[in-house]
Amino acid sequence: MNPLSKLIFELSKLPGIGEKSATRLAYYILNQESEYAESLAAALVSAKQKLKYCEECFNFSEHEKCEICEDSKRDHNQICLVERPSDVTPIEKTGTYRGVYHVLHGLLSPLDGIGPEDVKIKELLLRLKAREVSEVILVLNPSVEGEATGMYLSRLLKPIGIRVSQVAYGIPFGGTIEFTDRQTLGKALENRTEMYK
Amino acid sequence: MNPLSKLIFELSKLPGIGEKSATRLAYYILNQESEYAESLAAALVSAKQKLKYCEECFNFSEHEKCEICEDSKRDHNQICLVERPSDVTPIEKTGTYRGVYHVLHGLLSPLDGIGPEDVKIKELLLRLKAREVSEVILVLNPSVEGEATGMYLSRLLKPIGIRVSQVAYGIPFGGTIEFTDRQTLGKALENRTEMYK
């Protein structure tokens, strides 16, 4: 494969990028100074090499613990539970949340054979054992899997005396947390409601 | 800037990729095995390093001359004139053209101060001097600049005994050569018409 075809081939593996878009991007890159291709290449390798999972919350982190988990000014009694690392940034951008996070890396989906052991629930329980936590706030995509996961966690955590709440469903059903605007998401966090048992 | 922000920043420089798309792509890449980030990075650097302009036709090439210019089975008496390297691939895909190419790297645009010396017209004239050429086929985007360039070249080349033709305008005005489907483009090549003087 020649270098141009190879570049188009690699770019077209990206989500939402078909062969035509990949071709357009490849020619764009070739028309830029070498510095751009080199700095994009370096950013790719560096991000993938340096970012690991935080050993506490499982968000991406350059160090063993992420900046949020290391921050003593954050409220470590409050854990916000999200499905994916990409859900953390929009919540941080609301500027209203001062607690910490826990990234599940998936949602329960019995139909797809995804059970509690396939997501970071065991790791959450270890955190809850290791340190006093008063509240777990569920910020999960409003879907069947999101609701199933919320229900499961509520039933698991309430008996051990932890308040379990979920964001207000101002978020439209079928939408995604990742791309919700900060106002809607900030409001939804503020209006979180206590989970029924 | 942390590695994730840096990757998002570099990706968002690509055309049509805003901050949200760049974020989505970055997280996608982080969720893949390291091999993907590495092979995309290698493809970027390799394409930019290895591809130069063919000294004959000015398309991208790994060597001094591109594969098409080096191919003795192609008809070197026929030169297809295009604006950009990315216009060559769709013409090749029609499978009907057996001549060679010349990439202008721009179109004449007096209003923007782009004259004949700013595109590869001098280089075209040198090719026409060095070797017998019977026909120059214009395959330029149907725009004011495309027509101005065609007119200029027709007036320049016809007096020296070279047939100048242009693709049939089956291509819709306002469209681009790069993304025209192969059937339309093949037909347009077949039905090319002799330029008026």
Image (tube, coloured by chain):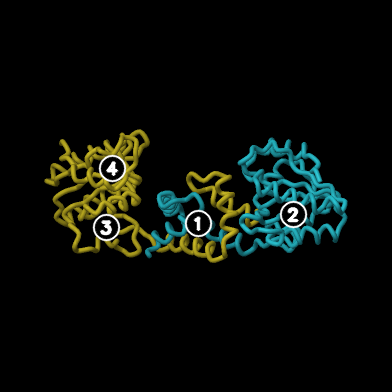
Chain colours: A yellow, B cyan
Label 4 lies in what chain?
A
Decide which of B39, A108 is in the foreground and name it: B39
Count of numbered badges drawn on the protein: 4
Nearer to us: label 4 or label 3 = 4
Decide which of A3, B66 is in the foreground and name it: B66
Residues at marks 1 and 4 touching, judged by CB atoms closer than 8 Å: no
**How dense is the environment of label 1, judged by Cα within 10 Å: few (below 14), some, or many (20 and up)?**
few
Left or right: B60 as drawn, with respect to A24: right
Relative vertical location of residue B115 with respect to residue A116 in this rendering, above or below:
below
Residue A140's mark? 4
- Give coordinates of residue A3: x percent, y percent: 63, 57
Label 1 lies in what chain?
B
Which residue position is annotated with label 1? B35
- Distance between mark 2 and mark 1 Cα atoms: 37 Å
Decide which of A18, B180 is in the foreground and name it: B180
**How dense is the environment of label 2, judged by Cα within 10 Å: few (below 14), some, or many (20 and up)?**
many
Relative vertical location of residue B143 with respect to residue B46 in this rendering, above or below:
above
Tell me if I can see residue B165 in this picture: yes
- Distance between mark 3 and mark 2 Cα atoms: 59 Å
Q: Secondary structure at mark 3?
A: loop
Residue at screen point 76% across, 61% down = B122
- Give coordinates of residue B28: x percent, y percent: 43, 50
Q: What's under tag 3, amino acid-wise?
A: Glu
Label 2 lies in what chain?
B
Which residue position is annotated with label 3? A56
